[in-house]
Amino acid sequence: MPQSRFHHLRFLQPILILLLIGIATISLTFSIQSFQAVEKTIRSSSFKAFNNSIEASYDIVDTALNESIKRYLRGIVTTSAKFITQIQASPSLTPEQKNALIQNYINSNKIGDTGYPYILNSKGQLVYHPIFQGRNVSEYRHIQEQIDNDDHFVEYLWTNPGEKKPRRKLAYSIYVEELDFVISASAYKNELLHFIDKTILKDKLNKYQYGKTGYVYVIDLVGELILHPSYEGENIRSLIGENADGLLKKIQQSAHSYSLQMNLVNGSSETIFHTANVEDYSYQITIDNNTYQKDVLYIYYPYLDWAIVSGISRDELHRPTNTLLYSLLALVLSLATIIIILLLLLNHRHKKLVNVLNRDYLTGLFNRRAFHEMASKHIKDTQHSASFKPYSIILLDIDFFKRINDNYGHIVGDKIIAIVGKAISQYPHILAARYGGEEFVLFMKESTPKQAIRFTDQVRKKIDQYNTLPEKVTLSAGITTISKPNVLLDDVIEQADKALYHSKNTGRNKVTHYQEL
């Protein structure tokens, strides 16, 4: 090879090396920046899902308690309504005797420590009350809600005379039209805590564990494990040793700082709920000579003086980002391919997380929150008269579901709920969700009342194809069809709920359209 050509090659070699090093450096820098962005997103998504699991557990505890108390208060109100109706209908009693009997009944019935039944008329005046007979209380928002609804369950803040802080109170009421009476029963939430079924609650919480090493458990302020998969009844110190002291101290601080503020006055007043927040705690634990970092989230539940806790190993929480870190070492050979794969994995993980958060675990249908978001968006997109097309909201409720649970157990009850969900899911063009308990809600686009009723009957008939109980499972339905834009979703659902109430109140196993009322 001629010297000049060899010289040129020797001159070009370092240039090529520098060029390759420059390309590799730029590619690696870009890869690191991309990795950091992806890592931040996945960390945020993972932590959000972990955070949502503890918030969902809080809602489960609160819903279980509210439902138990609601059933209890409904029984009191129903019994009171029958008694008062009989008294008022008695031809042998004078008006003075009727008033005396009813007032004595109100005075003698106690709910919890300080709760009581009471009766008001449709103008908000207390007709019968242990203390304030004749007082007009229509300025209170919860009273207005009771007047506006024939059947209502409400939670609000209230302060008894002599008390410094407001407490949450629950009230259930029904309207007796022939007497113009709103018959109600109310009690403080923390006075009726014994109605909660811990066994059912524990089963529900177990379904909200996050990851393989995470699970939800409940402790009181001194560390006793109220609900735990394996160590229920023991103290948390027996599990995590001295690390429990720091966790319990933070929980006790949360309990001490918890407060409620109330502004219940005339006009446009608002009730302010200062709720407990999700907080975090970390500690190290050594098992079989291996040390693990544990991340814990907890939320204080004031009505039972409990803390709802969920812990997970940091390795598992950060596992997706660690996987990405290992993948980064291979980017020198295939940077472009790995970046595409990471983006696809991130997108898949995001969709999976969103899907889990939006779905009801028992039926696979959307949950209530997701239904509200999607249905509200559809209504908003078609709010202009030119693009508007009628739509229907359908509410379905399993008849005598409590009797099914009582006769066959909650496992069979859950199976029946799943059966109804399966029947509804056969129609993928219908937006459907489990609305709560044994109730389902469906959004039917571009439908007339006849189409909505015909579709609802199809769903009700499909239940027979899946039901294996010796007795027939039936559904009651309420439907409303909206033929004009700019109607709020909550108002639409309220119409369907009134139609459903009519179906259940007039024999069940039937469909009622709101236009028929």
Image (cartoon, rainbow, N blue to C red):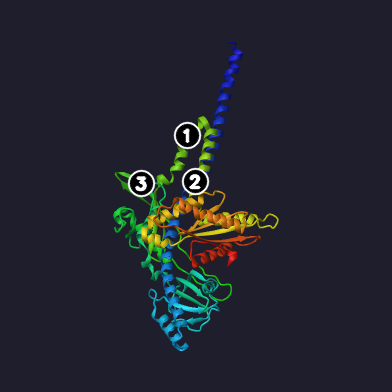
x and y, in percent, of residue 463 in the image: 47, 53
Density class for disc 2 (Cα within 10 Å; few <14, some 14-19, many ≥20) is few
Density class for disc 3 (Cα within 10 Å; few <14, some 14-19, many ≥20) is some
Label for residue 134? none
Q: Which of 324 and 182 is in front in this view?
A: 182
Q: What is the quadrant of the N terminus in the image?
A: top right
Q: Nearer the viewer, residue 480 or 141?
A: 480
Kindly state the secondary structure of the residue where label 3 is placed: strand
Q: Mark 1 points at which residue?
A: 329
Q: What is the quadrant of the C terminus in the image?
A: bottom right
Q: Which amino acid does label 3 sit on?
A: Tyr
Q: What residue type is labelled 2?
A: Lys
Disc on the earlier residue, 2 or 1: 1
x and y, in percent, of residue 370 in the image: 53, 54
Disc on the earlier residue, 2 or 3: 3
Q: Name the residue under label 3.
A: 292
Label for residue 352? 2
